[in-house]
Amino acid sequence: MQTQHFQFEAMLGKGSFGKVFLVKRKKDRKQFVIKQQDQNSGNAWLNKMISAEVECMQILRHPNIISYYGAWQESNSFYILMEYAARGTLKNLLDKRSNPLLEKDSLYLFAQVVLGVHHIHSKNILHRDLKPENIMLTGCMGDIVKIGDFGLSRDLRENNMSHAGTYYYIAPEMLKKEPYDFKSDIWSMGVVLYEMLTKELAFPALSISEIVDMICKGKPQLFKTVKVARDTKIIVFKMLQQKSSKRPSTRLLLLCPCLVPYIAKVYLNLGRAYASSPETFSLDIFNPFINTSSTK
């Protein structure tokens, strides 16, 4: 695989992580995303991020996770070929709206986030940077979730407990530089769901020190301007428990009464992707995601 096999259409993003391009494969005009990162012998951290992202994407195969198609080195750059989510990100969707998403739409999208993160955790991987910018949308209606950007992900079995993530979405134990586990991703998911339901940040601070203070010491003042169902409020508050041990696992989230109907709808709408037929839908199709050897 080489860059000459692709036509570069547009730059989608640029930063310390490198550049992200929308490309078309010349032989069939199919669209993909290519992430380009310059090899830098003097920046071991960035090089490690590239390796970590590739390793994670090679392992993760799920309808709600951005697909990985290959990686290669060319000259002094490293390239990763990935699925293109044509409907932008959850952040794009929220930013262009004047009002929050409808509760039913929020829960439908969030059910897919839960399914995707459950798969990630079942592989002993933490995402560590779950936020609207890293939740992509695709499909004709823009209602299929694809979780991406695994540059900060890590295998829980590693000894390195470095701390990562974006401050508004990062769990208190990570901000305190304490040991963390899968429940840190659950916290981030709670912040994301709250933002979908209200179009507000759960911790609307203006400085890093204020954010840290609000997340680590304060009690969030939630749902003051938007009314949602009691069961939906409960699931958000459970995910935003200060003590990580009190937060639900993804397995428990899959079984929450307010989410089960939406998870069922996901299977009905994406039956082929989940290797299940909508015509023969039954609760048994949840087994691959609920009955894992993982107890996280």
Image (cartoon, helix red, strand yellow):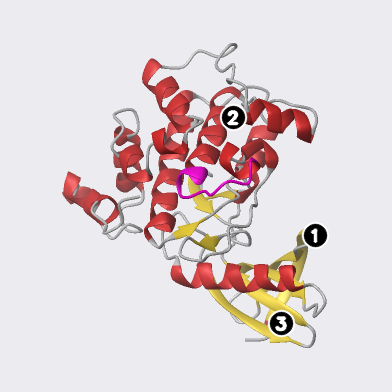
Query: Between 118 and 258, which is closer to the camera in this rendering?
Result: 118
- Residue 126 in the image: state x and y as whole percent: 50, 55
| Residue picked out by circle 1 | 14
Q: Which residue is more in the foreground, 146 or 42?
A: 42
> What amino acid type should be assigned to the residue bearing mark 2?
Glu
The image shows a total of numbered marks equal to: 3
Residue 3 disc label: 3
The answer to which quarter of the image holds residue 167 is top right
> Would residue 216 be found to the left or right of residue 123 on screen?
right
C-alpha distance separating marks 2 and 1 = 25 Å
Q: CA distance from mark 2 to mark 3?
A: 38 Å
Query: Label 1 is placed on what type of residue?
Result: Lys
Residue at disc 1, secondary structure = strand
Q: Tell me if 57 is positioned left or right of 108 in this view.
A: right
Dominant SS of magenta comes to: loop
Q: Position of residue 72 (x, y in %)?
A: 64, 83
Q: Secondary structure at mark 3?
A: helix
The relative height of residue 55 versus residue 219 in the rendered view (above or below) is: below
Q: Residues within 10 Å of mark 2 (few under 14, many from 20)?
A: many
Residue 77 or residue 235, whichever sits in front: 235
Mark nearest the camera among 3 and 1 is: 1
Disc marking residue 131: none
Residue 220 lies, in percent from the top left, at: 58, 21
- Mark positioned earlier in the residue sequence (2 or 3): 3
Are the residues flagged by discs 2 and 3 in contact, CB closer than 8 Å?
no
> Of circles 2 and 3, which is in front?
2
